[in-house]
Image: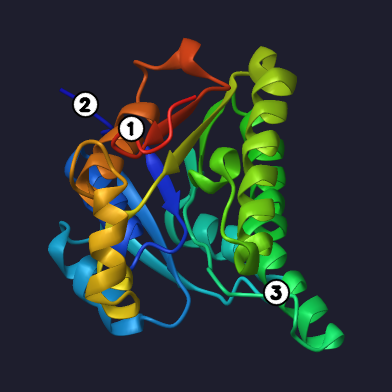
Amino acid sequence: MIDLSGKTILVTGGSRGIGAAIVRAVGGAGATVVLHYGRSEAAAQALQDELPRGKCHLVQADLVEPDSAERIWADATAAAGPIDALVNNAGIFEAAPLDMEIEAWRARWRRVLQVNLISPAELCRHAIIDFRGRGGGRIVNVSSRAAFRGEVPEQMPYGASKGGLVALTKTIARGYAKDGVLAFGIAPGFVATEMVSENVDAAKIAAVVADIPLGEMADADEIGALTAFLCSDHARHLTGATFDVNGASYVR
């Protein structure tokens, strides 16, 4: 049984989908949770109400903004005290087809990289500096199957950003293990969330499932449970590893 009692865990993009499953899993294991959200305030508040009173703190910021990571870390520590684990889950999936006007194409790349890679890297920076002074901590970066398998051409920014997140995770693990800073990656394929059901039509979902040998999309709760395990004291020598959650749709 995973026991995260006494630990404080910051989860970005924690109001919906995979993030909400992570919040429920680590909160259910006894952790105090700092739930970051961008726009889904009502969903964040509803999730906060699911956890015991005083065990979930909300912080809001748009990760597109260059100073957002600074504010998230400051607000999180002000609300809950020292952070023991950082979970970089927030991300966006926005197309940048080659036939876009060049300035719009560049802007889309900058936006996706800012949210999916630069802001998480800045949060990792804050976490490493803090963790090194307190004997260590955990970082879990939620990447994607696309980091290894690649993405469709119009989603090059997404694939590139998630590949960068995997490399970031490995570099942190190798560079700071001696300080007790452990870093892990999770690389989901398609996950059954409201984001998928709201934005992908039935024919596309059927094609996605047909490509998965297990015959179904992953459940977000699987990723929540894996994250709780990685934030625990049972996974120290897994540092640097990235875990595929894709039903064997891509096997490395």
Tell me the quadrant of the picture where the N terminus can be found: top left
Number of numbered discs overlaid on the protein picture: 3
Q: Residue at x 72, y 57 (%)?
A: 118
Q: Nearer the viewer, mark 3 or mark 1?
A: 1
Q: Which badge, 2 or 1, is on the more N-terminal residue? A: 2
Q: CA distance from mark 2 to mark 3?
A: 36 Å
* Direction from residue 182 to residue 129 in the image, left or right: right
Can I make out residue 84 in this image?
Answer: no
Residue drawn where x is 68% and y is 63% of the image:
157
Give, as a three-letter code, the residue at label 2: Ile
For residue 13, which quarter of the picture? bottom left
Query: What amino acid type is highlighted by mark number 3?
Result: Arg
Q: Left or right of 35: which side holds 191?
A: left
Q: Residue visible at 64% across and 63% down?
A: 153
Q: CA distance from mark 3 to mark 1?
A: 31 Å
Give the residue at mark 1.
Answer: 248
Residue of label 3 = 111
Residue that sits furthest to the right in the current view: 102
Callout 3: few (<14), some (14-19), or many (20+) C-alpha neighbours within 10 Å?
A: some
Frontmost residue, 22 versus 219: 219
Q: Residues within 10 Å of mark 2 (few under 14, many from 20)?
A: some
Which residue carries the number 2 mark? 2
Residue 188 position (above or below residue 71): above
